[in-house]
Image (tube, rainbow, N blue to C red):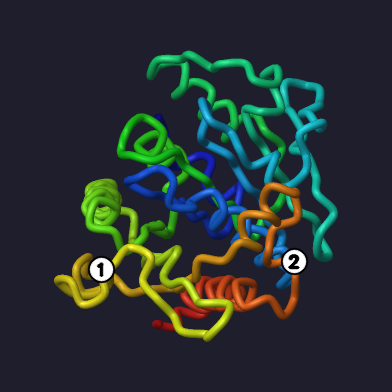
Amino acid sequence: MDSSQYPARIARHRIMVMSGKGGVGKTTVAVNLALGLALFGRSVGLLDADLTGPNVPKMLHMEDQGLEGDDGYLEPALLPVGPEGLKVVSMAFLAAKDQAVAWKGPLKISMLRQFVQRIDWGDLDYLVVDLPPGTGDEPISISQLLSPQGAIIVTTRHPVSLDDAARSIELASAMKIPVLGIVENMSGLRCPHCGRQVDPFCQEGAGGTPDELLGVPVLAKIELHSEISRSGDAGRPVILQSGNPAARSLEGLVERVIGMLETGTPI
């Protein structure tokens, strides 16, 4: 793969959202990050690189859309949000509903190359890539194809999740992708009756905080909140709900990413 031909032409800033472990909210973070960047007036694309488990269209209520085009190029599906809209590409737009995409490595790599080279992304400020969990074909291929300027690692405080997050950080380092930081998802649960915050993983004080254990900064801490799940299932991500505490945490993430990539502002 020749990584020099395509990245800058597609987007000025390219971010891959990773997790070592499934079920930690990586796609939720990627979708809300992309939407937040669009709401901040940036031109944004969102590439769902989880070919065998594409969930991005459901979280954006775009299941009935598809990819169309001619002259060998396809147009991304467009979600009208912000001044520019959000351009979305997903395997879910090409496969039948509930169809199992039972592909081995070469087919996955070929499809990712098509998503990068044969999609008319236009002139983007940001391309956010939602990767499947782990350190396999997809993150390696995206690293080679897009030369991202940064990786965001999504994790919880649970030791198993932190162990796998460390592997994602190691892969990013091996691929020479700077790790912008981690998002600690489900960082706490606030009691609706007394307002006291508790650690759902019972790991408070156990061995250190995630940034201490992983050696990278925390970009955002997002509490465990039922509205995050409900809004994602309904296709209206929580960042669209101004004033929601979870939305404020995600807006902070967006601001930090913009500061780091556009102005070089440290955390």
Residue shown at 75%/76% (left/top)?
A: 242
Is 18 positioned to the left or the right of 52 in the image? left
Q: Earlier in the sequence, mark 1 or mark 2?
A: 1
Q: Amino acid at mark 1?
A: Gln
Q: Residues within 10 Å of mark 1 (few under 14, many from 20)?
A: few
Quadrant of the drawing holding the N terminus: top left
Q: Above or below — where is 64 with respect to 255? A: above
Is 13 positioned to the left or the right of 216 in the image? right
Which percent across, then down, holds residue 138? 41, 33
Q: Nearer the viewer, residue 96 or 168?
A: 96
Q: How many marks?
A: 2
Residue shown at 75%/55% (left/top)?
A: 236
Query: Pointer 2: what residue?
Result: 240
Helix, strand or loop for disc 1: loop
Which percent across, then down, holds residue 63? 76, 34
Using the numbered discs, state the Cα–Cα distance from disc 1 to disc 2 in whole angstroms.
Answer: 31 Å
Q: Residues within 10 Å of mark 2 (few under 14, many from 20)?
A: some
Residue shown at 69%/58% (left/top)?
A: 237
Asked if marks 1 and 2 touch (Cβ < 8 Å), the reply is: no
Q: Nearer the viewer, residue 93 or 22?
A: 22
The label on residue 203 is 1
Which percent across, then down, holds residue 148? 44, 52
Helix, strand or loop for disc 2: helix
Q: Amino acid at mark 2?
A: Leu
Which percent across, then down, holds residue 158? 29, 59
